[in-house]
Image: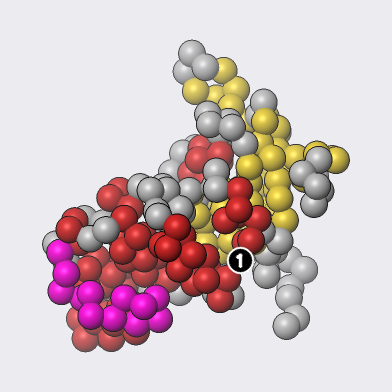
Amino acid sequence: MAYSNQPLIKIEDLHYAYPRRGNVLNAVNFALYEGERVVINGDNGAGKTTLLHLIVGLKKAKRGQVFGFGQACHSEKEFNQLRAKAGLLFQDPDDQLFCPTVLEDVMFGPLNLGFNKQQAIDKSIKILKKLGMEGFESRITHQLSGGEKRMVTLATVLVMEPQVLILDEPTNALDEKAKARLLNVLLALPQAMIIISHDKLFSAQLATRNMNLENGFLTEQTNTGQQHKEVV
């Protein structure tokens, strides 16, 4: 498969600080290309989730620039355009699921894009079937297991046909069987991905590239896990 040499997501000189905490991100530079699955490692509190939220415009950088699919993102309108192509999977599925039933949750995005009800139903059923969730359409979302909720949240993202998946601790609260199922699904997807996960085995099986966030600096890692340069 031939890939473009233009980055899908690019960050230049990104800085962020929380009140009374100081800088969390210092001059972060990063680029994601087609076909990549980039895992960002780092300790709790290092700023990994903050970085993901900055990429999709849920937080505003103190300094620096985010580019999405060739477009510099400053305004909410520009970040909305980025979010239409880069789907964020939240760490806690309950933060992403708010409708009574599975089908209603998955349909929500397509309906907001202007699809009619039948089109939204058809798209949603198709993506649920792809994820092995056929027959769950009428299930009450909040009664599902952790693994089932994770698959539904993934369906709510994939139904929007994003070019990039941004995954925040996707194995959070999953048992080993659910992790294995999720891993197989993600490995079969064509989308480029940015992943943060404390599950080393899971992320090692997904990653095409590893990075580390420490003391506010994002650095590339070699296959042995040693940092060797700052990303530029």
Q: Quadrant of the N terminus?
A: bottom right
Q: What's the residue at 80%, 52% (across, down)?
A: 223
Q: What's the residue at 34%, 82% (across, down)?
A: 129
Q: Is residue 127 left or right of residue 209?
A: left
Magenta region includes residue 137: yes
Q: Kindly identify the amino acid type of the residue bearing the numbered disc 1.
A: Ala
Residue placed most toward the observer, 178 or 93: 178
Q: Which residue is mark 1?
A: 192
Q: Kindly state the secondary structure of the residue where label 1 is placed.
A: strand
Report x, y in % for residue 125. 29, 82
Q: Main secondary structure of the magenta part?
A: loop
Q: What's the residue at 50%, 54% (across, down)?
A: 167
Residue placed most toward the observer, 111 or 223: 223
Residue lying at the far front in this picture: please name it. 176
From which residue to which does the magenta span run?
129-140
Marker count (numbered): 1
Residue placed most toward the observer, 11 or 145: 145
Q: Quadrant of the C terminus?
A: top right
Q: Is residue 15 left or right of residue 58?
A: right
Q: Give the quarter of the image for residue 6.
A: bottom right
Report x, y in % for residue 40. 63, 46
Dot 1 alpha-carbon crowd within 10 angstroms: few under 14, some 14 to 19, many 20 or more? many
Q: Is residue 4 left or right of residue 42?
A: right
Residue placed most toward the observer, 189 or 117: 189
- Any part of residue 98 in sight: yes
Instruction: Give the answer, above or below, for where 66 lies relative to 37.
Output: above
Report x, y in % for residue 190. 58, 75
- Any part of residue 70 in sight: no
Instruction: Give the answer, above or below, for where 184 lies relative to 147.
Output: below
